[in-house]
Image: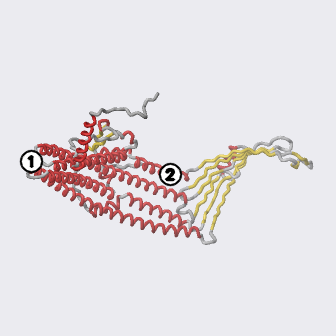
Amino acid sequence: MRLFDEFIGIKQTSRLMIPKQMLVVLLAGWVTLNALAEPVYPVLTSPPPVKSAQPMEARKTKVLTLDECIKLALEHNLDIRIQQYNPLINQYNLNLSYGVYEPSLNFTASHLYEDPAGTVVLNTGTNTGIGSGVFEQNTYRPEIKGILPTGMTYDMTGSWDRNTDKQFNGTFGPPLWEATPGPGLTLTQPLLKNLWIDSNRLQIKLNKATLKISEAALRLQIMTSVTAVKSAYYNLLYTRGNIDANATAYKLAEQLVTENLKRVEVGALAPLDEKQSESQAAASLAAMQLAEQQSLVQENTLKNLLTDNFSEWADVSLLPAEQLIAVPQSLDLQESWRRAVTQRPEMIEAKLNIEKQNVTLKYDFNQIFPELDVTGSYGRNATDSTFSDTLDDISHGDHPYYSYGAFVSIPLGGNVTGRNQYKSGKATLKQLLLTLKQTEQNIVVAVDNDVGNVRSTYQQVQATRDARVYAEDALAAEQKKLENGKSTSFIVLQLISNLTTAKVAEIQALANYNVAVAQLSLDEGSTLEANHIDLKLK
């Protein structure tokens, strides 16, 4: 049993339907030829819905002022938070380098038992014997040692022994306390090499300069992040202004579409002229959608500067609470240069690098000298049957000991290592001085460019504002002429496009001006003062 008959055709159409089918085919061909002869313009009456990753009604709106954004950045910006640890780490390293001067207290206790075999012992008279002289000793050795900032080493120590001997007759004699050597002090002071600076003092000075450099780097990071926040905020204002400008253009073009449709219906306007307004409306819609996407990207740029947890801000729509305005600046190029060369963290860091190299050069010069150390020691010995009597002997000083001397070490090859290290340090210092000069010159050039940019962008604000006003007046006049039948839709559409371009240019000029002012403040090194940020480092 087959479901389909492959050999016998199934009749589905009666003979009466054949003429009707031919008529339908002819009508379809005629419509197709007309379609090929004249293009079809779709009538755009309303914009299609703009799709986004997150529906606008589901996004939370957060209105922020610029000061609020800067405050959030100071608390949560990851670049700032990472940089904040460097001064803390370098402070610990500095504290650690002082630990070399911390004295150490050492205490050693030991017990000695000795039973030598075959000891010859002389007894009374002419009697001799082979006996065992057992010896026991308890030793206590306290010690305090360390080094002073002058390079002098000190060692306060003493050896306290409690001895007992087993006599030939097999009995132990009375214990005996000995302080040999007794409590004393040994000092060693360099006189040439390592006198005015040694490796310990070098490291401390270098760590101090490194701490200051990290503080300057943190200051620069805060200034850079604050400037980035301001630029992102101004650019976000620009993108939103761009959306508004294109939305206005789309609204005007849509109104013109509606009016032209009525004119076409009454025969007062050719269909082709009406299509021009639809084309302009579609172009304005596309520009508005592009501006919306640019605004979302700029929002993310600002969010990335404000938070250390982007996921919490992913569904938040940032809305600037301020408007773009151009506040005139009092520009003084000489004063800006003076501020820059004294306040810029890069200048401070370059000077600190020179300071570090001077310290290193001082150490390298000292290492050229021969090593000449003087040493001396003084102490008191004592021996008695009791510990208290031993202390009395020490206090009386009946058995003192002392020593003094000198140690000299002269490289026989002329100290090739030390001399070449010193020459290398001098060359490095010259290089760092040139680096400082280069840094200063780059800063001066940057400030000069910034001052010129601030002046230029302020003039652009004035010019674009005038252009926007003229474009508004021209469009208003042409719209009245169109209403009176003395103009065309093409001219009105062109003026709508000109007005949109003028609005966007004005908003861009305002954003560029404020960004230029922020950049000048950064290059002057006055960002923190301009934004009332008090940077206190512990």
Q: Which badge, 2 or 1, is on the more N-terminal residue?
A: 2
Residue 289: give its label.
none
Residue 263: x, y in percent? 12, 45
The alpha-carbon separation of the residues under discs 2 and 1 comes to: 80 Å
Q: Residue furthest top?
A: 1
Give the amino acid type for the residue marked by disc 2 in the picture: Asn
Label 1 secondary element: helix
Image check: 365 left or right of 464? right
| Residue 323 seen anywhere in this rendered image of the structure | no
Q: Are marks 2 and 1 in contact (CB under 8 Å)?
A: no
- Which quadrant of the view contains residue 137? top right
How many residues crowd around disc 2 within 10 Å: few (fewer than 14), some, or many (20 or more)? some
Residue at 31% across / 33% down in the picture? 13
Residue 93: give its label.
2
Residue 73: x, y in percent? 35, 46
Image check: 463 left or right of 148? left
- Which quadrant of the view contains residue 439? bottom left
Q: Residue furthest right?
A: 126
